[in-house]
Image: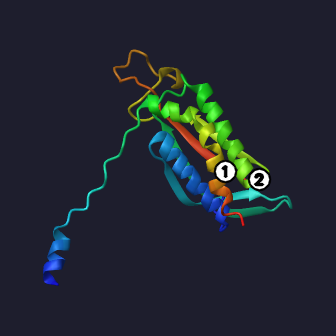
Amino acid sequence: MPDLPHARYQDLLTALTSEFTHTFGGCTIIHGLAGSYLSSAGLAVRDRINLIYTDTPYSFKDNFEIVSTYAHELKTASFAALEEEAILVAAIPSITRHEVIPDLVEGFSRDSPRKYSSVLTHLAYLCFLR
Amino acid sequence: MAKNLRDLKEAKIERPPRLKLSAKESLKRTQEFDKRKEQFIAAVRKGRS
């Protein structure tokens, strides 16, 4: 999400932090990332971005509909609060070092002695200004 | 004063242990977002003035 000096952006970050901490037990925020976007005038504009993400302690595959609905509800709530023209919430399955789902990893052998368990879901929240 | 400084050095600062949410509880909270939605929106809107 844009790291702009408006109270509403800081409040959104605070609200998301509280929400992710309550729902998933914690979250991570990366401040001050450098970004660039194409403005309506056709010029590249550099800006600063905050990235907030969290992990779900349950299987992404088995609960896809629930995660999808949650992401949609977050988007709707953020839209209602900010009235931004474009908001994107992304739920992305990812693999952690100790947890592997063979179906998601190309070339991974099911016979591997590696321990299988649920894959943590990285729920990344992205908010774009048009 | 010196006694107070020594006390400070000996004081242990411990990070509170993290509460590990179970998958079941986290899933339940994920599904209950609609109950928190209005509160979420209000928390963001309060800074819009």
Q: Which corner quadrant holds the N terminus of chain A? A: bottom right
User: Farthest residue toward the top?
Assistant: A111
Q: Is residue B11 above or below residue B25?
A: below
Q: Is residue A1 visible?
A: no
Q: Is residue A29 above or below residue B27?
A: below
Residue neighbourhood size for the residue with mark 2, other residues' Cα within 10 Å, grouped as few (<14), some (14–19), many (≥20)? few
Which of discs 1 and 2 lies nearer the camera? The answer is 1
User: Farthest residue toward the bottom?
Assistant: B1
Q: Is residue B46 above or below residue B39?
A: below
Camera-nearest residue between B11 and B36: B36
Instruction: Say which quarter of the image contains residue A61.
Output: top right
CB within 8 Å, label 1 to label 2: no
Chain letter of disc 2? A
Q: Which mark is residue A83?
A: 2
Chain letter of disc 1? B
Q: Which mark is residue B1?
A: none
User: Farthest residue toward the right?
Assistant: A41
Q: How many marks?
A: 2
Q: Which residue is mark 1?
A: B41
Q: Which corner quadrant holds the C terminus of chain A? A: bottom right
**Residue lying at 50% horizontally and 40% vertically, measured from the top left:** A23
Residue neighbourhood size for the residue with mark 1, other residues' Cα within 10 Å, grouped as few (<14), some (14–19), many (≥20)? many
**Residue lying at 41% horizontally and 32% vertically, measured from the top left:** B22
**Residue lying at 71% horizontally and 52% vertically, measured from the top left:** A81
* Residue A27 horizontal/vertical position (percent): 48, 47
Question: In the shown orientation, is residue A29 left or right of residue B16?
Answer: right
Query: What amino acid is found at the position of numbered circle 2 in the picture?
Result: Glu
Q: Is residue A99 above or below residue B8?
A: above
| Real-space CA distance between mark 1 and mark 2, rounded to the nearest whole angstrom | 11 Å
Query: What amino acid is found at the position of numbered circle 1 in the picture?
Result: Ile
**Residue at disc 1, secondary structure:** helix
